[in-house]
Each structure stands twice: as C-alpha cells, then as structure tokens.
Amino acid sequence: MLTKVSFQLNGKQVSVEVDPNTPLLWVIRDTLGFTGTKYSCGMGICGSCTVHIDGKTAKSCITPIASVANKSVMTIEGLAKDGLHPVQQAWVDEEVPQCGYCQPGQIMTAVELLKNNPNPDDAEIDAAMKGVLCRCGTYQRIRKAIHVASGEVQDD
C-alpha cells in the first residue's frame, strides 16, 4: 500500500508516494536522488546514514518515512547554501577522510554537537561521536576538525 508523505528536505517541500514503512534512507537516495547519505549496516549501528530530523540526528536506515511527515529533514547536501559549512571546511582543512564512507554521518553528527555545545572538550566530542563508526580510524582527525570548526559555527 502506497501512502503520500510530505516533508521538508533540505529546506524544500517534497512529497513522495511510497510504502509508509520504507526507510527514510531509501526515499532520500532512491526516490529523491540525494546520494550523500550513505547506506552501510542497515541496522542503525554504524551511523553512516545520519541525517537531521527537526534539527536532531537520526539514523535514516531505521527511520520509517511515515515518521517524518510534516517534519524537516536535512542531509549532508543541505548543510550549506553556498560553499561548505564550517564543519565541512574543517574536515577538508584537517584532511579527515580516508575512504570517506562514514563522513556524511560524522559531519552531520558534529554539526548537531556544535549547535548544542559550541566549545566541546575531547570527552564531550568522543561521547557525541560514538554513534558513528569509522573503519579507517580517523577519530583523532575528526576530533581535531571539530575543535577547529567550533570557533566558526557559533554564529552559523
């Protein structure tokens, strides 16, 4: 049974007709064509699929599309209107990615962290970021990039 679900994606109103139990991830990627959000574990464990729903991080692989009706969803593609978001720029400047697969989830998680805690210490960064796994082990560079970005996102 298909259901029409309307929500805001990256600041624009969208409507899709899909099974209401379809994971948000597949609607974002396959139906709407935004491929920045990555699929990895499919169980909400690794965090590669992290997006923001009404400003809070969520694992899109386990979020049914019906649950985002009339809500605001932001993907990695929606972070910055022009150029790069300060967190994305810090990722580039600090050469964080290796394979890069987890980076959309890392960045989306870091953006929420800095929104809620503009100047986190190492322990706060580690606690906030523990929900996104990096197979390449770039955790030290991730932490450094968050510290770099923390000075720039306070006004964002």
Image (cartoon, rainbow, N blue to C red):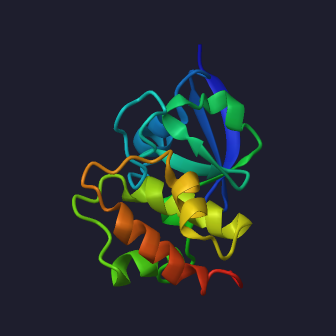
Residue that lies at the very extreme toward the front in this rendered image:
123
Is residue 85 visible to us here?
no
Quadrant occupied by the C terminus: bottom right
The part of the image, by quadrant, that contains residue 151 is bottom right
The part of the image, by quadrant, that contains residue 114 is bottom right
Is residue 149 visible to us here?
yes
Is 117 on the left-hand or right-hand side of 58? right
- The structure residue drawn at horizontal position 38% and vertical position 59%, both measured from the top left corner, is 103
Percent across and percent down for residue 44 are: 49, 33
- The structure residue drawn at horizontal position 45% and vertical position 35%, both measured from the top left corner, is 26
Is 79 on the left-hand or right-hand side of 47? right
- The structure residue drawn at horizontal position 34% and vertical position 38%, both measured from the top left corner, is 40
Is 31 on the left-hand or right-hand side of 19? left
Is 61 on the left-hand or right-hand side of 65? left
Residue that lies at the very extreme toward the top in this rendered image:
1
Percent across and percent down for residue 116 are: 73, 65
**153 versus 50 height, above or below:** below
Percent across and percent down for residue 140 are: 36, 67
**74 versus 59 height, above or below:** below
- The structure residue drawn at horizontal position 66% and vertical position 62%, both measured from the top left corner, is 11
**141 versus 44 height, above or below:** below
Percent across and percent down for residue 1 are: 59, 13
* Image mark count: 0
Residue that lies at the very extreme toward the right in this rendered image:
70
**149 versus 26 height, above or below:** below
